[in-house]
Amino acid sequence: MEIVILAVVIAVVVIGALGGLVIGSRRKKRQPPPQAEAPTETPEITAPPGQPQAPEAGGEPGRAPQDTGPATAEAEPPAPVVIEPEAPPAIEVPEPAAGRLVRLRARLSRSQNALGKGLLTLLSREHLDDDTWEEVEDILLTADVGVAPTQELVGRLRERVRVLGTRTPEELRALLREELLALVGTDLDRTVHTESGLDTPGIVLVVGVNGTGKTTTTGKLARVLVADGQSVILGAADTFRAAAADQLQTWGERVGARTVRGPEAGDPASVAFDAVKQGTEAGADVVLIDTAGRLHTKTGLMDELGKVKRVVEKHAPVDEVLLVLDATTGQNGLVQARVFAEVVDVSGIVLTKLDGTAKGGIVISVQRELGVPVKLVGLGEGPDDLAPFEPGAFVDALIGT
């Protein structure tokens, strides 16, 4: 009996324990699960019909970003980039051409030392014997005056000094100035002819050998003409040098002169023809034609230069042919000058680099050799350093007055 009662008690205890476990398990299942942080889902915003869905930043198209407050600077759309058109280059107003040589007189200082001061020093000696006069000749020859002009000048100086007897520095300077002026020539026409007398522009052809500064001289001459109130068209007929047309166009743009150019390695005569044609149609006053540099010994190139002149003259006669010579070449430049004069009938000389590195006597010898006047001289690298040649100012610069 006791055993039965004990078994019943044990069974009741076991059943109660099992029931507690079941109830505890059910209670745990009824508790809500803990809230876990999850990414907030962005609501989908539908755009009105006919408009595209705005894409979410860094997400899928058609989903707009959640409005989290005021937009930051990074979220703003970039401002549109406005590209301003390039402004045309400012038109320069060149300084007047008249009197430039006087203003640039200091550029002739080295030539002055070689020629003027040397002669004055010798002529101031107490006794002028044959040795002294030979020294005078040497100075003149070294200054590129040339043999014939030197002999002529020395002969006249010897005679006048002998007649004068006494020689003060002022008298010697006046005497030397007078004789040099006679050699340079005061009665030559040094005007750059730019008036045709017809219904066409004046035509100026610029020629010379390689490296004399023709293109630069043409650009500077355009400034001289614009300073005198003339309208200019530039013809870039140097088609062999790639940078020549660009260089000439840059010079023209600075003073408002249009440049006519052709294809690289094209026919220079065609470019020159078009320049005159466009100049006539535009009513320009002057057409300046820059030709390619060429060695005087190259027969084919010299014939081509003659062709350029003949083609241009189908429109109108050429009013001026300017030969550009490098003054530092001295007497060697005279050989070049003779050949060019035969081919294109040179009417005027432009001496470049006459800024202290050259010898002033070249002015005298080149005029004697060609029978044509020096009309312009280059006295530096500045845009307005091309000056009309003035004999009086030039001689004064040489002898230091």
Image (tube, helix red, strand yellow):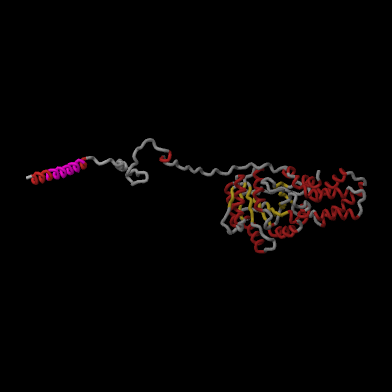
Which is more toward the observer, 74 or 364?
Answer: 74
Of residues 307 and 241, the one nearer the viewer is 241
Q: Which residue is situated farthest in the front direction here?
A: 2
Taking depth in this image into account, of 238 and 205 the one nearest to the observer is: 238
Tell me if residue 75 comes above or below residue 365 in the rendering.
above
> Which residue is at the far top?
70
Furthest toward the left, the residue is: 1
Q: Is residue 342 left or right of residue 316?
A: right
| Residue 392 x %, y % | 78, 45
Q: How many marks?
A: 0
Residue 270 at x, y = what percent? 59, 57
Residue 158 appears in the figure: yes
Q: Is residue 113 left or right of residue 348?
A: right
**Residue 237 sits in quarter:** bottom right
User: Can the viewer see residue 376 in this picture?
Assistant: no
The picture quadrant where one finds residue 169 is top right
Q: Quadrant of the C terminus?
A: top right
Which quarter of the figure is the N terminus placed in?
A: top left
Indicate yes or no whether the magenta region holds residue 306. no
Q: Main secondary structure of the magenta part?
A: helix
Per the image, is 26 magenta? yes
Q: Which residues are magenta?
A: 11-27
Residue 4: image location, x then y, percent: 8, 46
Residue at 85% across / 50% down in the picture?
A: 119
> Residue 242 at x, y = what percent?
60, 56
Foreground residue, 186 or 54? 54
